[in-house]
Image (cartoon, rainbow, N blue to C red):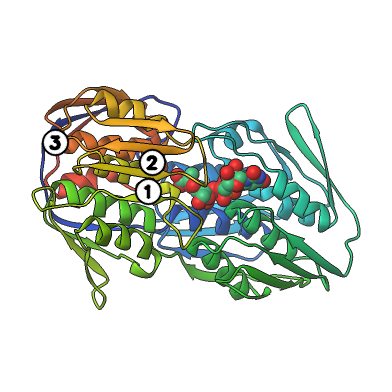
Amino acid sequence: MKSIGLDTSGKMIVKGPQKAKGTLTVSGAKNAVLPIMGASLLTDDDIDLRNVPDLADVRTMIEILESAGKVIERFDDQLIIKSSGNINSEIPYEPVRKMRASFNVYGPLTLRNGYAKVALPGGCSIGARPVDFHLEGLKKLGIESTIEHGFVTSKLNNPNSFINISLPFPSVGATEHVLTTACLLEGVKTTITNCAIEPEVTDLVNFLNKMGAKITGGGTSILKIEGVKKLSGVKYTIIPDRIEAGTYIILGKLVGEKLTIKNVSAEHLNSLFSVFDNIGSPVDYDEKKREVKVSETLLNPLNSISMETAPFPGFPTDLQPQITTFLSLVPGRSTITETVFKSRFYHIDELNRMGAKIRVEDNTAIIEGVNKLSGAPVEATDLRAAAALLIAGLVAEGETIISNVDHIFRGYENIHEKLEQVGIELIYEK
Ligand code: EPU
């Protein structure tokens, strides 16, 4: 395996402007595969996953599953998760620090072992990310949690037979965590309202039902779960990554030259498509082939827009930094209000160093379109910020050096190689 991860602070040198010409293929969805891998802890049978991207976050989840007693085999995009016969339900700080999604093994491990001790995730460079909704939901399922010395420790009580959980916000992680745990509470009927309806949550619902769970309401904001005694092994193919697809579409709108993006699920990207409709540059999608053809659009007359991020089906926060890069080059004043992670704006200062004119007021970025960006040394603070800066570097004049770029390998499989295949030259230095 190539060495990718968060433990080095690599640099990406981008000499702009460049053009992307050829075909990019979208990989399996990071945010779908991670909770699905976590849910493998509900069974001792083999789980056989396909379309699994090779990402730093997937490797972190492999590490966690191995420390919890699973044995993992990987062949290309296939991941087989087997049981070693033992379950260890204590997960140390290191992997949880690297990736908050790892916290979602806490509920399943508690049910399998009667107890779990998992590091409490810390702060994060996209804003506050507490786990109070998770712990309150799990408490209703009979899981009492104590927080001490940075760890959450559980005690399993007998749950009621009928449980109603209403999430204060449609949190993706809390929906997935509570839902997964409720599946194995034999005979217990749980209703979760105000659920997240992101496609990745629906993929998890489909996966769990294939394992033998009894969940109804997939794709809606009310999930009903009838707990079962046992879940079984399953073969399952992960959905394509809508955020990777969206990132490459935005990249293509700035530097594409007849760029084709394959394996795109347009039904997951309506909000991005309507943003481009409003900007005046519709996305050319072939439904039969499930592919987008995209070319540079900046020479066309474009409209500035006002938009906001929101839970699905709204515009994803995970595409906010990338669309900010795009809007920084659209004439006029655009605004983006961030309603999911209200301080996810650390990329703005970096874009401004490249000549963008953006200011942040409360949770809104106010963007005055400029006619060019210029290369500069910048720093990536998280995965999507790294993607936004890489796109900016490709369209800018001169050299951009993105430090801490390794974040990008958490969410974009083989991005360096994929972009090379469409004619983009990047220099990566460890
Ligand atoms: N929140 C709470 N308490 C909780 C949980 C969430 O206050 O217990 C708040 C958060 O602080 C945030 C909002 O609820 O303001 C939404 O957070 P959510 O729980 O939905 O986010 P998440 O599950 O931690 C997942 C993705 C993120 C993506 C968000 C929103 C995974 C592994 N991660 O995070 O993906 O931004 O949903 O769609 O699924 C990324 O891929 O770059 C990424 C950050």
Give the x, y percent position of residue 146: 83, 38
- Above or below 188: residue 248: above
The disc label shown at residue 371, or none: 3
> On the image, numbered disc 1 is attached to which residue?
319
* Residue depicted at x 14% and y 46%: 255
Residue contact at pointers 2 and 3, CB within 8 angstroms: no
Q: Is mark 2 within 8 Å of ligand 1?
A: yes
Left or right of 37: which side holds 359? Answer: left
Horizontal placement of 314 versus 114: left or right? left
Badge 2 vs badge 1, beta-carbon distance below 8 Å: yes
Q: Amino acid at mark 2?
A: Arg
* Mark with earlier residue (2, 3): 3
Helix, strand or loop at label 1? It is helix
Up-down relation of residue 222 to residue 22 (above or below):
below
What residue is drawn where x is 58% and y is 71%?
220
> How many other residues sit within 10 Å of disc 2, few (<14), some (14-19) or many (≥20)?
many
Q: Which quadrant is home to the N terminus?
A: top left
- Residue 58 seen from this side: no
Looking at the rendered image, the disc whose residue lies closer to the viewer, 2 or 1, is: 1
Q: Quadrant of the C terminus?
A: top left
Q: Which mark is nearer the camera, 1 or 3?
A: 3
Name the mark nearer the viewer: 2 or 3: 3
Instruction: Give 76 or 41, whichever is nearer the viewer.
Output: 41
Determine which quarter of the picture holds residue 276: bottom left
Q: Nearer the viewer, residue 296 or 25?
A: 296
What's under tag 3, amino acid-wise? Asn
Asked which quadrant contains residue 399, the reply is top left
> In the rendered view, does 304 fall on the left or right side of 240?
left
Q: Which residue is mark 2?
A: 384
